[in-house]
Amino acid sequence: MDEEPLESEPEKPRYLLPDGCKGLIDVIRLQQKDDDEDLVSGILIGSEELSGDPPESIELPEFVTVRDLATALHTQAFLVVKVLMQHGFFKNVNSQIDFITASLVCTHYGVTPFKAP
């Protein structure tokens, strides 16, 4: 009694979804794949997020808005918000952050911050 190996059937989805949701799921999977490729030891690569060459150092006041910090770092404001969120600070582009918090973002991008007199 020879038993033939069973051909593996394609995996069936667990839930039946409307047609519009299947495309959304594909987009989410692609985004997760892109996020996984950008991660290096759990830290996002900062240099790929910059739109231009970052300055080596910047002079910051005691308080600065997220938008102004992004401009000084030659990046987009939502990317600075993303870095802040990764460190537990929930701010928007119009929020003011102190020098220490801004320094944290600067070091993420490899920029040395200096406090303005």
Image (tube, rainbow, N blue to C red):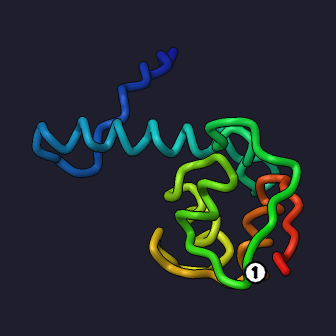
Please name the residue shown 24% across and 36% down the image. Answer: 23
Front-most of residues 53 and 37? 53
Query: Dot 1, crowdedness within 10 Å: few (<14), some or many (≥20)?
Result: some
Question: Where residue 40 sits: x, y (%)?
Answer: 78, 47
86 above or below 99? above
Question: Where residue 110 sits: x, y (%)?
Answer: 85, 53
User: Which image quarter is the C terminus in?
Assistant: bottom right
**Lateral position of residue 64 relative to residue 23, left or right:** right
**Lateral position of residue 34 relative to residue 103, left or right:** left
Front-most of residues 24 and 60? 60
Report which quarter residue 94 is drawn in: bottom left
Q: Which residue is mark 1?
A: 99
Question: Where residue 91 sits: x, y (%)?
Answer: 51, 78
Please name the residue shown 71% across and 51% down the image. Answer: 44
Report which quarter residue 21 is drawn in: top left
Report which quarter residue 25 is drawn in: top left
Please name the residue shown 56% across and 55% down the image. Answer: 79
Name the residue furthest front.
Answer: 117
The amino acid type, in three-letter code, at marker 1 is Phe
Element at label 1: helix
Question: Where residue 104 sits: x, y (%)?
Answer: 78, 71
Front-most of residues 95 and 79? 95
58 above or below 40? below
62 above or below 38? below
